[in-house]
Image (tube, coloured by chain):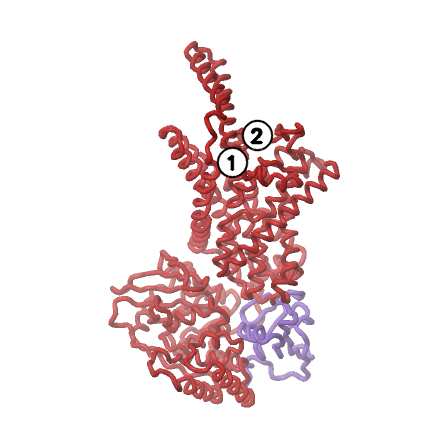
Chain colours: A purple, B red
Amino acid sequence: MKASGQARAKETQVDLIPLCRLRAGEGGCVGEVLGTCDMVHRLREMGLYDGAPIQMIRPGSPCIIRLQGQRLGFRMDDCAHVMVRVSAVAS
Amino acid sequence: MMPPATDRSTWTFALIGNPNTGKSTLFGALCGVQQRVGNYPGVTVEKTLGELVHAGRRWILVDLPGTYSLAPRSPDEMVAVDVLLGRLADVPAPDVVLCVVAANNLERNLYLVSQVLELGRPLVIALSMVDVAQDHGLQIDTQRLSRQLGIPVVPIQAHRSLGLGDLKDALAAAGQRPGAIPESPFPPAFRDEVDRLESFLAKGDAPAAQSRLPRYLVERLLLDTGGYIEERIPSNGDQAAIRAELSAARDRLGQAGCPVPAVETMARYGWVARVVEGVVEHPVEPVNTWGDRLDAVLTHKFWGMVILAVVMLLMFSAVFAWAKLPMDGIEAAISWLSGHIEASLPDGPLRSLLVDGILGGIGAVVIFLPQIFILFLILTSLEECGYLARAAYLMDRLMVRVGLSGKSFIPLLSSFACAIPAVMATRVIENRRDRLTTILIAPLMSCSARLPVYTLMIAAFIPERQFVGGLIGLQGLVLFSMYALGIVIGAAVALLLKRTLLRGAAPPFLMEMPVYKWPSPRVVLHRMFDRGWDFLHNAGTIIFAVSIVMWGVLYYPRISPGELAPLTAARDRLGHERDDARAAGDAAREQAASTGLAGVANRIEGAQKRQSLLGRVGRLIEPAVKPLGWDWRIGSGVIASFPAREVVVATLGVIFDVGKEVDEPEGSQRLGAALQSATWPDSGRPLFNIPVALSIMVFFALCAQCVSTLAVIGRETGTWTWPAFTFGYMTVLAYVGALVTYQVGSWLGI
């Protein structure tokens, strides 16, 4: 049961890349969230659930990302790792 | 389910919502005056209550801390859950829950709503920040949202006091109906497991209704793998059996495709998606608002840091500049009062206790109030407008290097004014180890109370050299170095702590960058007064008590009249001379005699101090402080300042026979001059030189000379080991630092 209300349906090819590799302005949908159990749950609660639209605003460590209607400052490390599904075809 | 509130005359409302949604503004707009009624028992969460009258009933509002989710991970987070479930004895169960939802971020806000709904209380939603949503190009169909939720949704603009009437009506109406039993968003497999767990827990249980766990908590037991709730459930039953049952249940859920805890976010966000369907119209292209453009500059890697440095510089300049006038005013008031008392009471212990002990003690505390107020006025404004989150983001990179995260930056910044509110501000740091590390290094950030010592030593002993064509002065550089020393040592201590005692990786950084907004004056002023009151209440009581003890230690034992004989003889002689001169109308001779009289009075007092307990202790430890370049007089002054550093300048004034009024410019010049001419009794060498002055400043920079801070640390950490540890390590650091400074300085021949 996926909460992917806004996932785009027509992708010809989908890559799963780490969030830190997105450049400013690039976006996609949240794929896997990895890390310590507590951090993963916290990230999901904040809106990084499977299928949520995500956009990178300021890459780096920490980075600033845009989710639906909010901006989060977020540092990717051993405790918290986010994989993003990007369509290989620009849409 | 609780019956509706209709029959009672006092209704209780709980106010909950995400952080940064304007909840505090709404609370202030509804209630006017907040009351902080202390803390909830056993935790650091403050209980905030407000009252209003509506339709002949008394309404009590309980403001709960802003939270993203009702999944408690600590005793502090459990408070909100307990209040909403009515499990706290001193807070009545809320009749209606008012949930603030920000319109520009419906999805995440509704996650919390989904949890609150399950508690079964009547719920009303106040939809805030509709104007922000519109700026972002969002269109919200409030009616449809209300229909699809099944709950009244009232749009409000709290800062403009719009929508409050409708909100109160909705709250009144909700209180008349029992709460709706919500439809669970969870899949059947999960619900079955919860039923199973409920009956398992009820087995072998005293069948009294109160001891049965509410369904929400049974769910949490199953979901929260961190185990916080597991530890909290009453042990009516075998703990090990319950754990085994939980483990088995989670395994079954995992196999059924509902892994714990992921099933919660999947279920709830799925529910949210259904609820907002058709409610929100997103713009075709994301709108670039002025806030977005501002962020591009303020979070820039280079320019962002530059702007942050400028903001901090301006903030501290403002604190010191704006505080000057009120501080002078307070000084004047205290001098006037002490002069009055001195004039009206005879010489003796009572007068001395009142003037030196009590008034001196109160003065030492109250004098810092203006700085505290101004600093927190500025800090709260920055926090409310949204800038501090960006500052934490910018500083995170540096903080990670010492094992902390950007969240520790703000408390450490506050510590430059006063460590007491700073230690309390560390509550936002979730991880206990990192919170503790931040608390332990906060006192190293040079607070306002150290500034008088720095100023005195620098003015008296650091030459006024200029570099770079008058742009940088040596004195300013030394002052800056003292602050920098605290920061550098603090970083080193943090690193050490994170590698040894409080071992762990740097905490993760996940922080909302809220939408920029104009801070609400009411919220800012309230928080400013709260912090000021924290300081007064914590520091005030302790410094007051300690000042009285210090007075005693300086006053007793009294010097014998025989020892004082030569000085009293001189005083009497000068007194006669002054009276003769006055009778003869010789103004110049009268003036000379008066000055001489004042000088003798100071020396009498100095002799008394040498005889006192403090003086004797100072002489006792002299061998220990000689390697630092100090003699017994400096040693006494430093010991006297251990409870509260503020008193050191006045104590030095007394010990060096200059008198107590050394805070006005001419007084401090006299003290400076006295220090410059002080010598070692045996060799006649000057007591003070640059290495000595530096070693004193370094000692003050690194030493924990503030009983109030230690007491607050004890309260916030719940044990006395950490204040003791802080005191111990900082004293050792200070001693070694002062030692090294003096020895190296002398060896270098500065």
Q: Would you call the spot at circle 1 few (<14 residues within 10 Å), some (14-19), or many (20 or more)? A: many
**Label 1 or label 2, whichever comes before in sequence order:** 1
**x 43%, y 50%: residue:** B537
Q: Circle 2 sits in a helix, a strand or a loop, which is it? A: helix
- Label 1, on which residue? B650
Q: Which of A3 and B604 is in front in this view?
A: B604
Which residue bears the numbered disc 2?
B669
Q: Residues within 10 Å of mark 2 (few under 14, many from 20)?
A: some
Q: Which residue is outermost to the right? A: B748
Give the x, y percent position of residue B100: 43, 68
Q: Which of B397 and B481 is in front in this view?
A: B481
Find residue B57 and report its horizontal and vertical position in percent: 26, 65
Q: Position of residue B488 (x, y in %)?
A: 66, 52
**Front in this rendered view, residue B469 or B297:** B469
Task: Determine which of the numbered discs, if any, sits on residue B307 in the image.
Answer: none
Residue B110 visible in the displayed image = no
Is B82 on the left-hand or right-hand side of A29? left
> Vertical placement of B248 versus B490: above or below?
below
Q: In which quarter of the image is the N terminus of chain B?
A: bottom left
> Does residue B296 appear to the left or right of B747 in the view shown?
left
Letter of the chain that mark 1 sits on in the rendering: B
For the C terminus of chain B, the quadrant is top right
From the image, state whether disc 1 or disc 2 is nearer to you. 1
The residue marked by circle 2 belongs to what chain? B
Tell me: B745 left or right of B244: right
Asked if disc 1 and disc 2 are in contact, CB closer than 8 Å, the reply is: no
* Amino acid under disc 1: Ala
Residue B154 visible here = yes
Numbered label tally: 2
Q: In this view, does B34 lie above or below B687?
A: below
